[in-house]
Amino acid sequence: MTSSAIAVSGLRKAYGDKTVLDGIDFEVRMGTVFSLLGPNGAGKTTTVNVLTTLQKADAGTVRVAGHDVATETRAVRAVLGVTGQFAAVDELLTGRENLELMADLKRVSRRVVAPLLERFELADAGTKLVSAYSGGMRRKLDLAMTLVGDPRIIFLDEPTTGLDPRSRRTMWAIVRELVADGVTIFLTTQYLDEADQLADRIAVLDHGHLVAQGTSEELKRQIPGSHVRLRFADFATLDAAARIFADATRDDDELSLRVPGDGGSKALRSLLDRLGENALEAEEFSVHTPDLDDVFLALTGRASAEVTA
Ligand SMILES: Nc1ncnc2c1ncn2[C@@H]1O[C@H](COP(=O)(O)OP(=O)(O)O)[C@@H](O)[C@H]1O
Ligand SMILES: [Mg+2]
């Protein structure tokens, strides 16, 4: 056996004459988190569908746990768990019943159900119909269902999109627990900070190509860091401020200055002190941390505006 949980080479997929994946290659090592990062429409779900045998690739090879997804479908399905982008739970059953059904399907004892409800903070909600669940509760139930049968490789397709911050943190904590147990996780996301928090390796998908791949540190070296944006009332003030902050980038049209810095309270205080010492005042002041848009701008020279057909 190899140590790679997922190995993808030359993967192509088109819908009609629209190419969605134009030859992508990557490898996910056993027991790590790999994040596929991209805007809406980039092809994340298509990739997950091919890797989990739900859709056929047009070309290329994909091996999951050493098995070819095209020819060894059953063996692949036996090792993986999938949490879809749109929660695949049955509305007309309770949370507990959904989990019991999954246990029966996977032929494992229903004894796994109670601990899973507990772990996902659904113990009380377990007896309620899913139709009464919030979006966050559905997502948690969906992931709980994925974990029935202890899959060793898990696919999470945008697991936190649309979740409130608290549910998002619960999800992140569970992902970390799974990794600690040696599970391999393939996670798609639109959020740079999520990939940054969770992933050992990140691949950035853009118009069918992986435009960057590496650790979060490697990726961040390629994108601009945090900065503070200062907007001034007039050109003279902007000019004076630009002389003080030599490393800043100015935008004459917007009368603004981007000063590199981490946005921490110490850095902010020193920045404001320097303005004050020079009797300068900023009209507006904002702290900007890099997000997916910055990644795309840096890597492709374009904003990450939703990919359109
Ligand atoms: N079954 C399909 N038939 C035709 N086009 C599709 C189909 N599924 C997805 N697409 C198109 O393929 C592109 C990638 O979709 P998807 O993989 O869902 O992206 P993501 O998950 O990154 O938002 C989109 O432009 C989408 O409209
Ligand atoms: Mg998707």
Image: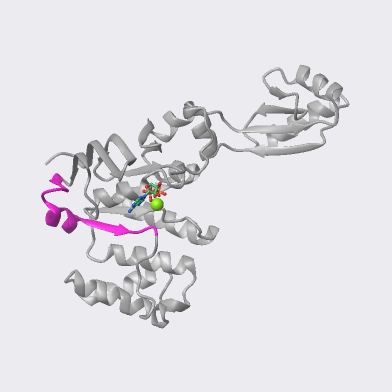
Tell me where residue 82 sits by quadrant.
Answer: bottom left
Residue 253 % position (x, y): 75, 27
Q: Quadrant of the N terminus?
A: top left
- Name the residue located 27 percent from the left edge and 46 percent from the top edge: 31
Residue 186 % position (x, y): 32, 48
Q: Which residues are magenta?
A: 66-85
- Name the residue located 35 percent from the left edge and 74 percent from the top edge: 90
Magenta-span inclusion, residue 83 = yes
Q: Is residue 185 visible?
A: no
Q: Quadrant of the C terminus?
A: top left
Closest to the observer, 38 or 282: 38
Residue 102 % position (x, y): 25, 71
Tell me where residue 238 sits by quadrant.
Answer: top right
Whether residue 244 sits left or right of residue 189 in the image: it is right
Q: Is residue 141 visible?
A: yes
Tell me where residue 235 sits by quadrant.
Answer: top right
- Name the residue located 77 percent from the left edge and 32 percent from the top edge: 231
Q: How is the image coloured?
A: one colour
Magenta-span inclusion, residue 248 = no
